[in-house]
Amino acid sequence: MQGFIDRLPTLEKGRVAPVSGSLEQCLLQLQPLTIGYRPRILLASTRAPGWTAIFDADALGHGVGERTAMLAGTIMKTRGYFFCSIRPKKEAPGQLGGCQFRVLGPEKRLGFVRSVNLIENTPGHWYFEARGPVQSFEDEAAYRRRRKSERLTQQMLVDYAAAVGLRPWEEDFYTGPYWIASNDLTATAKCSYTLEQARQRLGLSTEPPATT
């Protein structure tokens, strides 16, 4: 954790400060969520010795991937993993779905050592690709399934994470302490949202839109 704290101010051109509370309470402190600006980052200590989890305040949920690759590949020069699971369009009308698994590290200039991507390009139509050296725990047979949408599933991501000693879908995996990295760009963002507004925008909220 300390290595991240020492290096993040340079990457983010900002500052890092400790925050207190549960994981949920600390995640809520990332608000407002933003689009098009470098959002705030939450660092979370975990039960896996030496591993730090990273969350960010991107309102679309896309921001942390590139930044973790830069951290692992260029700044920290260490191993990292990126997991992403987004519901398909039919379940969340405001977004297209996808699953992503990435191995990060200094072996590649941009930090992406291994990438497996399942992307919903248009509603109900999927693109699958895998690049880089296959990891020993990967289910290669699944990558040959006839239905592209079944070639990389959330359960596969859970299994891949467990294979390297990580449990990112379990709340008790995150122990604290927690730190937030921020910068002055967030204050000038033209597109900013509360968590509930972002969920409504993505079709994830069960609450009716607010009226004035």
Image: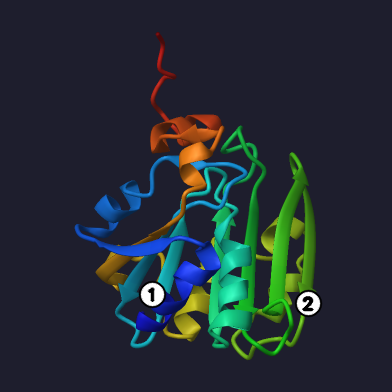
Q: Which mark is residue 92?
A: none
Front label number (2 vs 1)? 1
Q: In the figure, is residue 189 to the left or right of 146?
A: left
At a point 54% along the width and 31% down the height, the residue shown is 201
Instruction: Identify whether 160 is placed above or below 210.
Output: below
Residue under circle 2? 131
At a point 38% along the width and 49% down the height, the residue shown is 30
Whether residue 185 is visible to the viewer of this picture, yes or no, is yes
Disc 1 residue type (three-letter) = Ile
* Mark 2 vs 1: CB contact within 8 A: no
Instruction: Identify whether 33 is placed above or below 170.
Output: above
> Depth check: 200 or 67 in front?
67
Q: Residue furthest left?
A: 21
> Depth check: 171 or 25 in front?
25
Q: Residue furthest top?
A: 212
Q: Which element type, helix, strand or loop, lies under badge 2? A: strand
Whether residue 204 is visible to the viewer of this picture, yes or no, is no
Query: Residue 26 occupies which quadrant of the picture?
Result: bottom left
Disc 2 residue type (three-letter) = Arg
Residue 140 image point, x, y percent: 71, 80
Q: Which mark is residue 5?
A: 1
> Depth check: 37 or 169 in front?
37
Mark 2 and mark 1: Cα distance apart in space: 31 Å
> Depth check: 142 or 68 in front?
68
Residue 186 image point, x, y percent: 48, 44
- The quadrant the N terminus occupies is bottom left
Instruction: Identify whether 34 is placed above or below 11.
Output: above
At a point 62% along the width and 73% down the height, the residue shown is 69
Q: In the figure, is residue 109 to the left or right of 24?
A: right
Residue 150 image point, x, y percent: 68, 60
At a point 53% along the width and 84% down the height, the residue shown is 76
Of the image marks 2 and 1, the number of the one nearer the N terminus: 1
